[in-house]
Amino acid sequence: MAEAWMNHLSNLAAKNSLVDSELYTKYNVKRGLRDLTGKGVLAGLTRIGEVQAQTVVNGESVPAPGCLIYRGIDIRDLVSGFFADKRSGFEEACYLLMFGEQPDHKELARFKELLVTNRDLQSDFLHDSILKVPSRDVMNAIARAVLALYATDNNPDATDLPNVLRQSLTLIAIFPLLVVYSYQAHAYQYKNKSLVIHSPDPKLSTAANFLHMLRHDSAYTPLEEQLLDLSLVLHAEHGGGNNSSFTTHVVTSTGTDTYSAVAAALGALKGPRHGGANIKVVQMFDDMQQTLKNWDNDREIEDYLAKLLQKEAFDKSGLIYGMGHAVYSISDPRTLIIREQVARLAREKGREEEYRLYEKVEGLAPAVIASKRTIYKGVSANVDFYSGLLYRLLDIPPELFTPLFAMSRIAGWSAHRIEEIANSGKIIRPAYKSVVEHVSYVPIVARPPLWLDNDNHNPSK
């Protein structure tokens, strides 16, 4: 009876929550705050990040290869810079996003020392707030740990910029610890794995420290460190319009504390439509590899992709995961950067055949999608398409794919929180139009029963 009652309530809630899709057109409401071409509704101004996917030709906007810009600097130039110097880039990207300037050698070294100084968790916090309360989902465990940090802060609620900057830098420094330790607790409790805790090494970069703390033997190759560092750089920021960064702005505008704002951003990122997409890509390819008889047969691959769109394969969602983006159409710049590097790692690991299948799907999917769907802009592979493969080649457990995203994006969230505080004088409060007609109040004694007990035909208690 309880199950039937809950089903009834669920149906009732659904029926009275649905909005006629034609009303969005009637009132010119852009669902998802984007029009059919993917152009977003302008909701704010930022100096932190920029995403470009169009150019002007003869006075008209037309799709163009995508660009991702950090504080005015093209991401390709930033990556080329630290690749040429053969050094890690994430710490430099953090400095650039947070402070809007390119650090020289001295300032970058001081900034790294600052992160190392803050890269520490009190032993009682580690045991009481992480290891003793493992979660079935690592993202939830991280969010809980972030909220618990509020209690350890002597000045948690102040929103002046020096205090928020202190909190933000501390979070950037300790996020790798929160991610790894939350996973270790999860693996010990729910996967029957050994609990091995490594302390961070002050001599290592953020990426190297993550691999050192995650792996039982703390071993990793220079290429593995370089490519994980690259992934952190590419995920650190994506303009103020992405869901979790926008969440940071919205929640910050209320005047709340840093830990609450970051926890809200984590909740937004956890969703499979945002940070969880690369897990779906890997799972889709697992199913594809088991289904295909010949990974080199284009026709067989196209047939599988068509079945995905027709909800006849994998999770029957009708999606080809990793293909398409809300903004980019011709290309996602992060994909172009990471694809070549993933190929290097696949060669090092002896897994070129798996990588070639990804390449084939990337090339074939746009035409299959165009043949099955009405599309209003181009379709190309997004960064999730290859980042999941990268993490798999790095032997990173799937439970950590989205937490790794968070470990990187905490830099962007922190910059956006500071920007909102520096500029905001108002709470962010968009308008919603009610589309329900007026209903008269009916006294409770005159209301007919909405649901009847199957046995005695009395309203359920």
Image: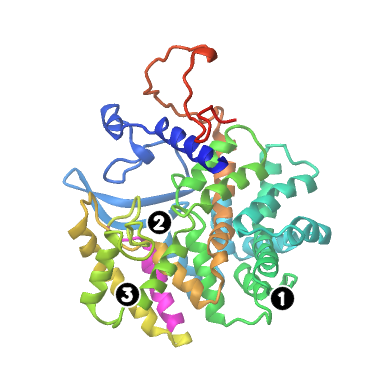
x and y percent of residue 54 in the render?
A: 28, 50
Q: In this rendering, which labeled residue sits more in front, label 1 or label 3?
A: 1
Is residue 215 at all visible to an observer of this figure?
yes
Q: Residue furthest left?
A: 58
- Which residue occupies the foreground of this view, 38 or 161? 38
Does the magenta run of residues contain 336? yes
- Residue 359 - label: 3
Say whether residue 330 is left or right of residue 285: left
x and y percent of residue 408 in the render?
A: 56, 59
x and y percent of residue 176 in the render?
A: 65, 63
The magenta-colored residue range is: 330-346
- Which residue occupies the foreground of this view, 314 or 131? 314
Does the magenta run of residues contain 43? no
Which residue does the numbered mark 2 point to in the structure image? 68
Q: Residue at x 70, y 69 (%)?
A: 188
x and y percent of residue 376 in the render?
A: 22, 49
Q: In which quadrant will I find the N terminus?
A: top right
Please determine whether, in this image, residue 269 is positioned above or below residue 206.
Answer: above
The amino acid at mark 1 is: Ser
Which secondary structure, mark 1? loop
Which is the main secondary structure of the residues drawn in magenta?
A: helix
Is residue 85 at all visible to an observer of this figure?
no
Q: Residue at x 48, y 12 (%)?
A: 442
- Residue 194 - label: 1
CB within 8 Å, label 1 to label 3 = no
The amino acid at mark 2 is: Leu
The amino acid at mark 3 is: Glu
CB within 8 Å, label 2 to label 3 = no
Q: In which quadrant will I find the C terminus?
A: top right
Label located before the other in sequence (2 or 1): 2
Q: Residue at x 55, y 27 (%)?
A: 426
